[in-house]
Amino acid sequence: MNISLLIDGADVKARSKRTFERKDPVTGEVATVAEAASVDDVNAACDSAAAAFPAWSATGPNERRKILLKAADLLEAKTPDFAKLMTEETGSTGPWGGFNVMFAAKILREAASMTTMIHGEVIPSDKPGCLSMAIRQAAGVCVGMAPWNAPVILGVRAVAMPLACGNTVVMKASETCPGTHMLIGKILNEAGLPKGVLNVVTHSAEDAPQVVEALIAHKAVRRINFTGSTHVGRIIAQTAAKYLKPVLLELGGKAPLLVLDDANLDDAVNAAAFGAFMHQGQICMSTERIIVDNKIADAFVDKLSTKANGLPYGDPRGKVVLGSLVSAKSADRMQVLLDDALKQGAKLVAGGKRSGTIWSATLLDHVNPQMKIYREESFGPVKSIIRVDGDDEAVGIANDTEYGLSSAVFSENIPRAMAVAKRIQAGICHINGPTVSDEPQMPFGGTKDSGYGRFGGVAAIAEFTELRWVTIESHQHYPF
């Protein structure tokens, strides 16, 4: 499949006349051939978005709502196309592709509902006869940068609320799934967005630094949002700071799942397995550290290892739970983490099997701080179990990380679980639920090296609007 750039409502070729390939991680065959955008293409996309902004920002909320709702319907109708593209470009399973589309449609519908929720307020003034207001207005051109791991969900999330708030958008597609991200742009334009309101650029990996800098530097760009690794997020934040531009970052995670000594073990096991191995563990919220009280650790590990060993894995085109990792490099990294942990005394209690880019569900018990997997985000299906004595040690281990995105606590005593949840340094905590969980209306985001700012619902309005102070005054008296 050949992928063009989407600029000013039209399919265009890169001015450099260069393309790049994305290969299927399982078969090695070329999945997509995409245009390799240069700085000139980026500037053209940003110029188009800037030209479209005055009219789009003045468009009524119900017209914006109608387009977003239509896009949600069109997106769902393309579910088979998205699922096929995701498997070819990223190695994901069909059900993961279907879930991506279903959830992304919810994001569009939630954004549509927000078009009439962009509220202001009247603030009492000390000046006689003065009406003083705080109002929210569209910020301008927004840049959205989405990753490959949940490409439809996160691609749509990067653009939906900015559009709902009246901004125009330039979306930077991931070089790992250019076809999937471009299809999102096509659908939104088909739904009725005026030309230039949403532009999509694809680029090769080697061109990423120049493309990202150009996107952030463009004089019309007023907001940036990025979902991806902490390493790249830090670069983007530093670049945005150079140009004094706000950026919303949702980055890596090392999500802890705490199993207290009074937890329902079956519930905790099911949540841990889902959170750890859904989409091969390639989710920012994935359960990375299973922290279990020693009093119930043996029973819990026995149940969880049995479940993990029973999860089918293999070619994502088959009936499996775990499909392929995104690349051979990611699969190699799993081996490094596994070997390092085993060398330092960890016990392999499930999995450990590999075939190319495909790994079985793998669990390491008795993980300690000297092992790489204790601190490094695996972003794959090799997960650690850490045994602790009591709630205080569990919280200490949970917070012993640079990350702070998602977390979970299992206990039958809800006040106890709430007390633990409040002490965990993470933007999200689920009591008796998995670390992998999201709803479009919720304030989604992290703390520490997991980023800052919030996607989702009303909270996202503040990220993509300018708050202005406007007064209406009459007959003022001046000292001279």
Image (cartoon, grey):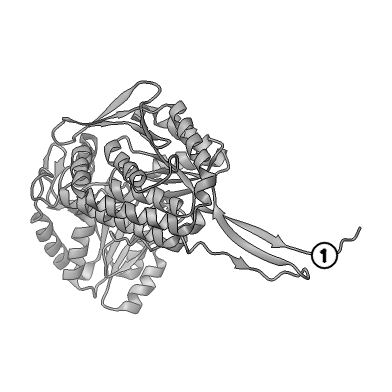
Q: In this view, does 389 lie above or below 7?
A: below
Seen at 18% across and 59% down, the residue is 273
Q: Where is residue 260 in the image (x, y as percent from the top left)?
A: 27, 70
Q: Where is residue 356 in the image (x, y as percent from the top left)?
A: 13, 36
Q: Position of residue 355 (x, y in %)?
A: 11, 39
In the image, is 241 to the left or to the right of 133? Answer: left
Q: Where is residue 100 in the image (x, y as percent from the top left)?
A: 25, 52
Q: In this view, does 302 lie above or below 232?
A: below
User: Which of 436/378 is in front?
Assistant: 436
Q: Quadrant of residue 187?
A: top left
Seen at 46% across and 26% down, the residue is 40
Residue position marked by numbered label 1 in the rendering: 475
Q: In this view, does 40 lie above or below 463?
A: above
Give the position of the N terminus as an image quadrant: top left
Q: What residue type is labelled 1?
A: His
Q: In this view, does 275 lie above or below 29?
A: below
Q: How many marks?
A: 1
Q: Quadrant of residue 22?
A: top left
Give the position of the C terminus as an image quadrant: bottom right
Circle 1 — which element? Answer: loop
From this viewpoint, is residue 131 visible? yes
In the image, is 177 to the left or to the right of 424? Answer: left
From this viewpoint, is residue 455 visible? no
User: Which of 208/42 is in front?
Assistant: 42
User: Which of 399/39 is in front?
Assistant: 39
Seen at 28% across and 59% down, the residue is 436
Crowd around label 1: few <14 · some 14–19 · many ≥20 (10 Å):
few
